[in-house]
Image: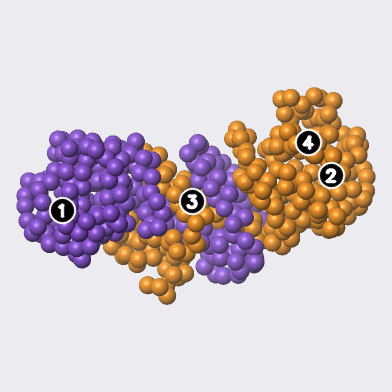
Chain colours: A orange, B purple
Amino acid sequence: MITIVLLGAGNVAKHLYEAFLPLNLVKVIQCYNRKGIPIHENQEEVFVTDNLQNLKKADLYILAISDDAIVEVSDQLPFQNRLVVHTSGSVPMKFMNDKNIRGVFYPLQTFSATKEVDFTSIPFCIESEEENELMLLKNVASQLSKKVYEISSDQRNILHVAAVFVNNFTNYLFSLGNDICKENDVPFEILHPLIQETANKITEMNPDNAQTGPGIRNDIQTINRHLKLLNNDSQKQLYTALTEAIQIKYGKKL
Amino acid sequence: MITIVLLGAGNVAKHLYEAFLPLNLVKVIQCYNRKGIPIHENQEEVFVTDNLQNLKKADLYILAISDDAIVEVSDQLPFQNRLVVHTSGSVPMKFMNDKNIRGVFYPLQTFSATKEVDFTSIPFCIESEEENELMLLKNVASQLSKKVYEISSDQRNILHVAAVFVNNFTNYLFSLGNDICKENDVPFEILHPLIQETANKITEMNPDNAQTGPGIRNDIQTINRHLKLLNNDSQKQLYTALTEAIQIKYGKKL
């Protein structure tokens, strides 16, 4: 049995705790958070501490805490030579204090408080400075998910910037679609199936082959008509910037 | 029984033909395309014509043809006072020749040749200049899909520009994510579940509430680190433009 101490009380900590609960070979033996409050409705208070000095001995310490707090908490841990990992997409492994054996246990997904999480399809990006510890992380991650990847801190950095494009910026485009519909009394839900299919397509074909629209067709008439319909400068500028970027990227095909 | 003549041989025509096949109350009695070739493996040649003069009498003529051809074909139809609709997101209904009763039968989805289509969840945007014909279109659309919307040509225009944001531009962001991963030997598939979840989230919450990332947090350090990682001016410019747009839109919340 692999024993875990889980630090943090945010969405990642809560969802991880819940995912570990049914497992037989992995057990969360203690949680830590600054308020010392249970992070699950069935968790007894005796298994939660607000004092790092009271942390139990475990095979693995998971810092599921905000990026800003990782270095500080890793410094404050009152032990050494144990396996300590964080769950962040952007903090390099080596930023943590080297008195412990460092690693990363990063579930690449967007989590919200209210939505249930099915970890089996969530990619885990793991990293460790020692081979044995990497195997242990792989073992733990494999019990939650079918998709486990060994990813260096540099590669994780790249994934993080790519994720900004495919998640943050994409969601922003959805918000503009929503605004445009709302301003014109058209229900945005009409676009939901198109959005689903746009996301589904890239699991089956390269997004370069899925690119369509007035930009790649260089359909100037439609582009101008669309720009006239938009009644907000920020929307117009972004429409132009994205259309130009599409034309730069696929220009040779035109 | 409602009889249909289906014009066109592209993805929309083929998928519509297939979707009509199992229906009892609606029947495609003839197809037209310039080459006079069957658009389905089980279709007999006798039901296909390459000559508009040979079109049979039917309750409904569906022009599932390219935007550019709609006006011309509607002019060339050798009959009048029949119900003629197109399937385009961007061509106004009244562009068609008014010798016939005009309408629109627009399935709002992105179609590809190879991928099977489940019409039951695809929104149909219908429009007609006469009330009886609108009811007939609603009847036909309802047999294919649970989602049928009466949408004016002006509203359809708005949907079309919103669709450019949530489909064309979104796919372009996916293609950049793919490029960034490829240039750095990271498998893009690691991001597929994040992309799926990004699209799923907006069916349950307003995209304004789902917005996250360094832009909305005004996390200058991460933004600058990301800009350094990007090795292509077009990617850098778009990262900056989208980050600024997010900050303009949500600025008041910062």
Indicate the position of residue A96 as horizontal and vertical percent values. Answer: 83, 53
Q: Which residue is mark 4?
A: A24
CA gap between label 1 and label 3 equals: 34 Å
Disc 4 crowd rating (10 Å Cα; few below 14, some 14-19, many 20+) is: few
Disc 1 crowd rating (10 Å Cα; few below 14, some 14-19, many 20+) is: many
- Image check: A56 left or right of B96? right
Give the SS element for disc 1.
Answer: loop
Q: Which residue is mark 3?
A: A200
Earlier sequence position, callout 3 versus callout 2: 2
CA gap between label 3 and label 2 equals: 36 Å
Indicate the position of residue A46 as horizontal and vertical percent values. Answer: 85, 25
- Amino acid residing under circle 1: Met
Which quadrant does the C terminus of chain B fall into? top right
CA gap between label 2 and label 1 equals: 69 Å
Q: Which residue is mark 1?
A: B96
Evaluate whether label 3 is on the same chain as label 2: yes
Circles 1 and 3: CB atoms closer than 8 Å: no
**Residue at x-position 38% and y-position 63%:** A215
**Residue at x-position 51% and y-position 42%:** B200
Circles 4 and 3: CB atoms closer than 8 Å: no
- Image check: A22 left or right of B81? right
In the image, residue B105 sits, relative to residue A215, either above or below, namely above
User: Looking at the rendered structure, which numbered label has been put on residue A60?
Assistant: 2
CA gap between label 4 and label 3 equals: 34 Å
Task: Please name whichever residue, B216 or B2, is drawn nearer the observer in this view of the structure.
Answer: B2
Chain letter of mark 4 equals A
CA gap between label 1 and label 4 equals: 67 Å
Report the mark closest to the observer, 4 or 3.
4
Chain letter of mark 1 equals B
Report the mark closest to the observer, 2 or 4.
4
Give the SS element for disc 3.
Answer: helix
**Residue at x-position 83% and y-position 29%:** A47
